[in-house]
């Protein structure tokens, strides 16, 4: 199962730290990200955060990341205007 989220992560350093924390709490999950390169404000400008595993507890993942003071939502189809 793969779940895709959007976040307001701004830097590679911040993203790497969040990845390490998430993997420490959830060793069975694989995660990666694509940084925001649009220059738009969150949520239209966002970092993509992918989590893969046999099962993904989205509430637990979101709670863990929110505890690190990062906004996170499940990716939905949206049309963002500049």
Image (tube, rainbow, N blue to C red):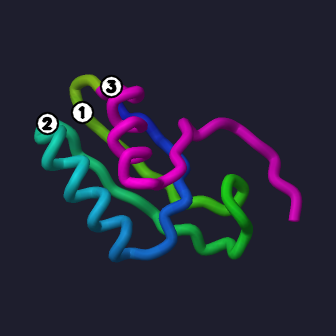
In the shown orientation, is residue 8 left or right of residue 28?
right
For the magenta stretch, what is the residue range?
A: 56-82
Quadrant including the C terminus? bottom right
Callout 2: few (<14), some (14-19), or many (20+) C-alpha neighbours within 10 Å?
few
In the shown orientation, is residue 29 left or right of residue 12?
left
Q: How much space separates mark 1 and mark 3, taking CA atoms?
A: 9 Å
Q: Position of residue 28 (x, y in %)?
A: 14, 36
- Determine the image quadrant of residue 76: top right
Assign a secondary structure to mark 2: loop
Q: Position of residue 75 (x, y in %)?
A: 58, 40
The numbered mark at residue 6 is: none
Quadrant including the N terminus? top left
Q: Which residue is mark 3?
A: 57
The numbered mark at residue 53 is: 1
Identify the residue at image location x=87%, y=58%: 81
Callout 1: few (<14), some (14-19), or many (20+) C-alpha neighbours within 10 Å?
some
Assign a secondary structure to mark 3: loop
Identify the residue at image location x=37%, y=46%: 67
Q: Which residue is mark 2?
A: 28
- CB within 8 Å, label 3 to label 2: no
In the shown orientation, is residue 46 left or right of residue 48?
right
- Asked if the stretch drawn in magenta spans residue 57, the answer is yes
- Asked if the stretch drawn in magenta spans residue 73, the answer is yes
Identify the residue at image location x=70%, y=38%: 77
């Amino acid at each position: 199962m793969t779940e895709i989220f959007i976040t307001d992560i701004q830097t590679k350093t911040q993203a790497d730290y969040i990845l390490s924390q998430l993997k420490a709490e959830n060793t069975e999950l694989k995660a990666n990200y694509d940084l925001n390169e649009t220059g738009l404000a969150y949520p239209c400008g966002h970092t993509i955060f992918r989590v893969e595993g046999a099962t993904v507890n989205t509430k637990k993942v979101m709670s863990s990341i929110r505890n690190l003071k990062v906004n996170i939502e499940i990716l939905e189809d949206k049309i963002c205007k500049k």
